[in-house]
Amino acid sequence: MSNKKDTFFSTILVVLIVCLVCSIVVSSAAVGLRSMQKANKIADTQKNILAVAGVSSNKTMKEIFATNIKAKLVNLKTGKFVEGGNVATYEQRHEAKIPGKSIKLTAKEDVAKIGRRANIAKIYLVSDDHGKLQRIILPIHGAGLWSTMYAFVALKPDGSTVMGIAYYDQAETPGLGGEVTNPRWTSLWIGKQLFNKQGDVAIKVIKGHAPKNAVHEVDGLAGATLTSDGVENTFLFWLGKNGFGPFLSNVRAGVLNHD
Ligand SMILES: Cc1cc2nc3c(=O)[nH]c(=O)nc-3n(C[C@H](O)[C@H](O)[C@H](O)COP(=O)(O)O)c2cc1C
């Protein structure tokens, strides 16, 4: 009888010890790997920015970010740079969830179907080795068919000519909407004009093929019209007055001021 009781308590004790050891191992791994995860996240963002930055040099990624690429915070309402603020730690995606640091978009405003928009955006200015501005990289996002699609778009300093786009976070169907990452499609964007001569948003993602030499039209993705519409709506929102519209109109006017 007492033997049975002993076995029962020993079993419980072993289970508890195993649980305790496992939880210590898992929590130590989580804490110990945190700094590595943070570093990997930064490296991943930098890799995506580099994809559209057009910096060709034999410098390391760290050196390029130290000398050629500068992150800046933009007040989306005024279209001006934010004075101060911790640009290194600013996370636009996180801020968009915080009332007071973001706005809730009305159904009419929310063409990209993002719900809320952070008041401040983090952009990147790419300069050559002499400090001359070469590209402006803007973060944009909007709904596709299945997912919110995140991208960087690089513009010439004229604030209208596209130099590259890179979708880096999306969950559209591979082979259909997932073709937003296909370099054959993203290369079609190079040289397109986002705005017309009157300064109105003019970029369009059309079903089928864009006419030869079209400056505002980009081919839609075959079999993925809904994702293609999502891409166009993402651009319409982020180039509009609730997105980078005020900032880009300052850029096009040649005035890049602080608040
Ligand atoms: C399993 C499955 C996955 C699909 N994934 C996508 C997608 O990621 N993006 C998209 O636009 N359409 C997707 N579609 C197709 C849409 O339902 C729709 O037919 C298509 O967007 C229409 O585009 P089209 O007019 O170019 O054919 C998918 C369809 C199926 C059956």
Image (tube, rainbow, N blue to C red):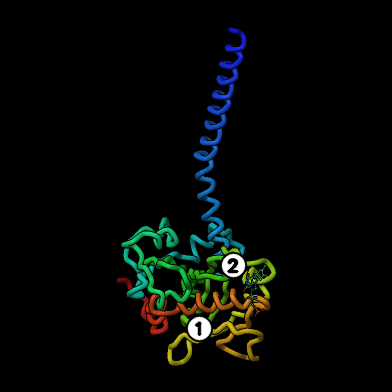
Q: Quadrant of the N terminus?
A: top right
Q: Residue shown at 59%/79% (left/top)?
A: 189
95 over 220 or under it: above or below: above
Task: Check disc 1 and report its element: helix, strand or loop.
Answer: loop
Q: Three-letter amino acid code at disc 2?
A: Ala
Q: Three-letter amino acid code at disc 1?
A: Leu
Q: Is residue 56 left or right of residue 243?
A: right
Q: Residue shown at 68%/75% (left/top)?
A: 184
Q: Quadrant of the C terminus?
A: bottom left
Q: Nearer the viewer, residue 60 or 94?
A: 94
Residue matched to label 2: 51
Q: Position of residue 194 (x, y in %)?
A: 50, 83
109 over 172 or under it: above or below: below
Q: Position of residue 197 (x, y in %)?
A: 46, 92
Q: Residue shown at 60%/83% (left/top)?
A: 218
Q: Residue shown at 45%/61% (left/top)?
A: 93
Instruction: Choose mark 2 or mark 1, whichever is in front.
Output: 1
Quadrant of the image occupied by residue 12: top right
- State whether residue 104 appears in this view: yes
